Amino acid sequence: MRRIIDGLRYDTEKAKKIGSVPYFFELYKTPNGRFFIYYPDKEIRPLRIDEAKQFYEWLTYFSIEYEEAFGEPPEEA
C-alpha cells in the first residue's frame, strides 16, 4: 500500500514493519525515519514520534525491538 500525504510518500513495502495488533493496525517506520500506521481498511496515517511510541505500547506482535525502532530509551532518574 502506498500513499502520498502532504507531499511525502508512505509505502508499506519499503518501510520497516515495527509490529501490529492483528485486524486493527500495523506500525511502520520509513527509511527516512518517519512513522505511520496502516489500518486494514487501506488507510495510512502519519505519526509524530511520541504517537508512534504510544502505539508501540499497544502492539501484540513485534517485528523489531524498541531500540531498533526508536533508539535507546532514557534511564530512570
Image (tube, helix red, strand yellow):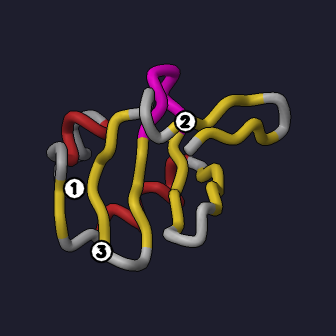
| Amino acid bearing label 3 | Pro
**What residue span does the magenta drawing correspond to?**
29-34
Q: Residue at x 22, y 34 (%)?
A: 68
Depth check, mark 1 against mark 2: the one in front is 2
Question: Spatial distance from mark 1 to mark 3, Cα to Cα?
Answer: 35 Å
The relative height of residue 42 versus residue 41 in the rendered view (above or below) is above
Look at mark 1 in the image and give the residue it sits on.
77
Q: Residues within 10 Å of mark 2 (few under 14, many from 20)?
A: some
Tag 2 or tag 3, which sits nearer the N-term? 2
Question: Spatial distance from mark 1 to mark 2, Cα to Cα?
Answer: 38 Å
The relative height of residue 7 versus residue 48 in the rendered view (above or below) is above
Q: Look at the numbered disc 2 and give the secondary structure of its residue.
A: strand
Instruction: Say which quadrant the N terminus sits in.
Output: top right
Look at mark 3 in the image and give the residue it sits on.
22
Residue 54 in the image: state x and y as whole percent: 42, 66
Along the line of sight, the residue nearer the viewer: 42 or 29: 42
Residue 61 in the image: state x and y as whole percent: 17, 65
